[in-house]
Image: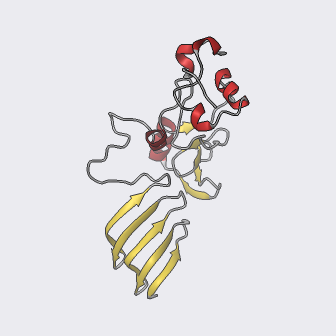
Amino acid sequence: MEGQGSYALPTGTEYRGALRDGMFDGEGELLFPNGGRYRAVWHRGVPTQGKYTFADGLKYKDKKWHYCDGYDRRFYTEICSGLKPADISQFTNLDPPRKIPEGCYDCGDGFYNPETRVIVDYKLRFLRNADDEEHEWIIRTCRKALDETIERKPNPCKQVLIDNNIPEQKRNASNHFPPQQHRCGNLKYCGMSGQVTA
């Protein structure tokens, strides 16, 4: 293969770019099933320089990487969009997080069933069998499906704004209700303060 083209790997990853003698050679990028992409300059199938971008737009840096380090543990979506109010937790970079099948774990590239020790991708296609080391790591570190459904009750103050057709950008701004109009009874923690104008 020579020239511009694309090549689909069995893992679902696709290469698009320059090819020479059947190898990646020149500018091209790998598109991963999870939405990430690696854009690089290739020489005989080996990247000589490149940049990885995660599905959410976060660009990886090999030097001075400050994302999710010991000082700042926010997800990238929280860095871009701000933190949620204190009563709303964000467990993953996806908001809302993907639903994990019962008894399984979200291990980053798919779901893991500890009974069968099988990892499937997010479209439930087989990826691999977990060895003992990966099994232990997933059980110790990854998010597990909840045994019971927990529904968050809507903030009554925010519901008033929704019912009165207050636009989203004004709903999330810092000016919402005078203290005497709060319905939640918890002015300090509900996140709504000030006056709203339509």
Relative to 176, say whether 110 is above or below. below
Relative to 143, say whether 10 is above or below. below
Relative depth, front residue between 56 and 139: 56
Relative image position of residue 187 (x, y in whole percent):
56, 14
Color encoding of the figure: secondary structure
Relative depth, front residue between 111 and 194: 194
Say whether residue 127 is left or right of residue 54: right
Q: Residue 42, located in which quarter of the rendered image?
A: bottom left
Relative image position of residue 139 (x, y in whole percent):
51, 38
Relative image position of residue 93 (x, y in whole percent):
51, 43
Residue at x-position 53% and y-position 57%: 34
Relative to 10, say whether 187 is above or below. above
Relative depth, front residue between 84 and 144: 84
Relative depth, front residue between 178 and 111: 178
Say whether residue 18 is left or right of residue 146: left
* Quadrant showing the C terminus: top right
Residue at x-position 42% and y-position 57%: 53
Relative to 109, say whether 94 is above or below. above
Residue at x-position 42% and y-position 74%: 28
Name the residue furthest front.
Answer: 197
What count of labels does the image hold?
0
Residue at x-position 48% and y-position 74%: 16
Say whether residue 161 is left or right of residue 138: right
Q: Residue 19, located in which quarter of the rendered image?
A: bottom left
Name the residue furthest left.
Answer: 63
Relative image position of residue 77 (x, y in whole percent):
48, 43
